[in-house]
Image: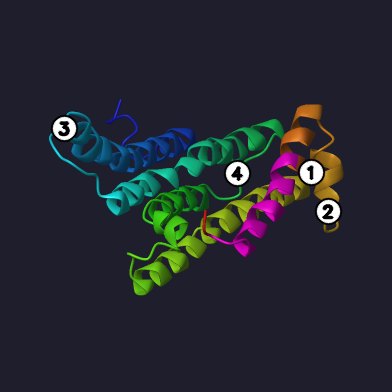
Amino acid sequence: MEKTNEDKLSPLFAFMAVVTMLMWLIATIGVAATVLVQFIPWSFGWVDTIDVMISRTLFWYFGHPLVYFWLLPTYICWYVIIPKIIGGKIFSDALARLSFLLLLLFSIPVGFHHQLMEPGISPVWKYIQVILTFMVVIPSLMTAFSLFATFETNGRARGTRGLFGWAKVLLGRTFASSLRSWGCSSSFPPERAALLTPATK
């Protein structure tokens, strides 16, 4: 099988599924570490105390990527299913893959932004974490651009004109396509509005 398809990329769905599973595996290291190294020895009486700062840090190492465990499958649906529903192709396969790699890269190490009020963490490290947190907006905006570019290019291929000519043709094809397309387009404003809210949770 590999020799037959050695010059071909893996399917986009398979690539994104692997990235999602990698996020699961990497993020759960924090939970596994705090349970195995702190909670279990403490529960058996082998140690007297638990380092609360380390415990919270390891929890948020897992807790922040937890948000992306439901977000990434949603992105997969947008990238893979919506183009099929509207009868076209995704605007850029490479852009879709890059956005998932960036989500994996930027989402893992930023749990400290949930601990901005912690006195035991250096302000310099908190500043770096806030910058990394805002970097997550890049793959999200890439996804928004890719989806609307998909609508536009497939609409143009059907002869539509104007800024939103694609909406009348593509979103009216089926009820399902209308729901999914408008659902994804309406999710980006509130998602990006979250950037303006405090990061302390």
Q: Tell me which numbered mark, 3 or 1, is placed earlier along the sequence.
A: 3
1 or 2: mark nearer the eye? 2
User: Image height check: is 38 above or below 85?
Assistant: below
The reply, left or right, for residue 112 in relation to residue 143 is left
Residue that mark 3 sits on: 45
Residue 161, percent across and down? Answer: 85, 54
For mark 2, what is the residue?
A: 164
CA–CA distance between discs 4 and 1? 15 Å
Whether pointer 2 and pointer 4 mark residues with C-beta atoms closer than 8 Å, the reply is no
Mark-to-mark CA distance, 3 and 1: 70 Å
Eye-nearest disc, 2 or 3? 3
Few, some or many C-alpha atoms within 10 Å of disc 1 (few <14, some 14-19, many ≥20)? few
Quarter holding residue 172: top right
- Label annotation for residue 129: none
Tell me which label, 2 or 4, sits earlier in the chain: 4
The kind of secondary structure element at disc 4 is loop
Residue type pointed to by label 3: Gly
Residue at image mark 1: 158
Which label sits on residue 90? 4
